[in-house]
Amino acid sequence: MNNDKVYVILHASRQPFISLGCRFGGIKLYGYEYFYLPPHDAFLRKDFVKKYNKHMKSRGSWEDFINELKKEV
């Protein structure tokens, strides 16, 4: 697996080694910083947070955002 392509980590609270990051709001993994998004129980890579905020501000859905990320892979 190419770690440069890990933009989002889903079901964050159920991941045994990184679930502690849910409590602290983020983690550093694979050399990248990830922020915790409580409404979606997911970690999002820091360089995609601005894109996420813009998408959600335009009343986009989480599923649409994930589909956009899949297109980038």
Image: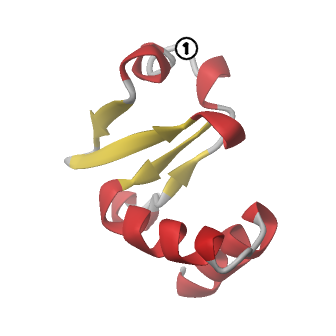
Q: Look at 45% across and 15% down and name the residue there.
A: 23
Q: Look at 32% across and 56% down and name the residue there.
A: 46
Q: Please tell me in which quadrant of the rendered image residue 61 appears.
A: bottom right
Q: Is residue 11 left or right of residue 12?
A: right
Q: Is residue 54 above or below residue 48?
A: below
Q: Look at 65% across and 42% down and name the residue there.
A: 10
User: Can you give x and y, in whole percent of width and height, for residue 17 in the image?
Assistant: 45, 16
Q: Is residue 50 above or below residue 46?
A: below
> Foreground residue, 41 or 10?
41
> Foreground residue, 33 or 58?
58
Badge 1 is on which residue?
16
Q: Please tell me in which quadrant of the rendered image residue 40 appears.
A: top right
The image quadrant where one finds the C terminus is bottom right
Q: Regarding mark 1 in the picture, which secondary structure is present there?
A: loop
Q: Please tell me in which quadrant of the rendered image residue 5 appears.
A: bottom left
User: Can you give x and y, in whole percent of width and height, for residue 8 in the image?
Assistant: 53, 54
> Foreground residue, 69 or 48?
48
Q: Is residue 11 left or right of residue 73?
A: right
